[in-house]
Amino acid sequence: GESVGLHLPTLSVQEGDNSIINCAYSNSASDYFIWYKQESGKGPQFIIDIRSNMDKRQGQRVTVLLNKTVKHLSLQIAATQPGDSAVYFCAENLKTSYDKVIFGPGTSLSVIP
Amino acid sequence: DTEVTQTPKHLVMGMTNKKSLKCEQHMGHRAMYWYKQKAKKPPELMFVYSYEKLSINESVPSRFSPECPNSSLLNLHLHALQPEDSALYLCASSGPTRGKETQYFGPGTRLLVL
């Protein structure tokens, strides 16, 4: 079936460097995308979202890029900090469903002090 | 305030026990969700309640029984669970309108079935 996937299951970066987490999706009917951060022992925490009529959206230290041509989503974290260490999930919302969100497999980000 | 609360935080139960997980939100959200998450895996959708009515049931076994007493509360009743049901159970909510709204998650209940 169609699913959301990630190119890199694990990522290690030096503190202060920029991080890029990638996500490939295969469902062209998806029109809303979300990035979540999940720290150990906690529930997923909303980071940033983007709708399919946009290519880029910026938040505080985070940027999400959407390339609908190649069905690719990325999360960029500027000046990565130890507190950014977590598992990051991309998720997609199908245009035909108001309520159902499909999660990708996740990427574990480790920040090296 | 984007807070979803869940109780209990941890739960250990035997296969013959009956227990309930509780979830609460006061953000005026009209959709509430139960997810199951195994270690190192993404959350898997179990149930969706929209305007207090069950709108999605992802073929979950009947030993899991959801209940939505009102727009702020969501329960998950557990009975005769199996050890493989041990997981983190997450509640989420979204709203207040029915559209593409961000889901906000609670901290989860970590369940161990012996």
Image (tube, coloured by chain):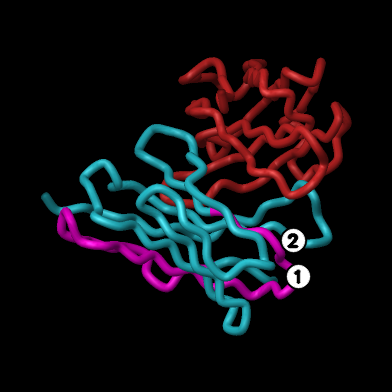
**Which one is in front, A38 or B40?**
A38
Residue B81 point in image, percent of width and height: 63, 29
Identified at 54% across, 19% down, the residue is: B13
Q: Secondary structure at mark 2?
A: strand
State the residue position of label 2.
A94
The magenta span reads: A5-34
Q: Which mark is residue A29?
A: 1
Note whether A2 is above or below B21 in the view shown.
below
**Which one is in front, A53 or A89?**
A53
Q: Secondary structure at mark 1?
A: loop
Q: Colour of chain A?
A: cyan
**Among numbered discs 1 and 2, the one appearing first in the sequence:** 1
Residue B27 point in image, percent of width and height: 67, 23
Q: Residues within 10 Å of mark 1 (few under 14, many from 20)?
A: few
Q: Colour of chain B?
A: red
Which chain is disc 1 placed on? A
Identified at 62% across, 31% down, the residue is: B91
Identified at 61% across, 83% down, the residue is: A69
- Please indicate, yes or no, whether residue B113 appears anywhere in the rendered image: no
Distance Cα–Cα, label 1 vs label 2: 6 Å
Which chain is disc 2 placed on? A
Residue A70 placement, left or right of A61: right
Identified at 79% across, 21% down, the residue is: B71
Residue B86 placement, left or right of A32: left
Check contact, mark 1 vs mark 2: CB within 8 A: yes
How many numbered marks, from 0 up?
Answer: 2
Note whether B75 is above or below A64 in the view shown.
above
Q: Amino acid at mark 1?
A: Ala
Q: Which mark is residue B94?
A: none
**Quadrant location, the N terminus of chain B:** top right
Residue B65 point in image, percent of width and height: 76, 27
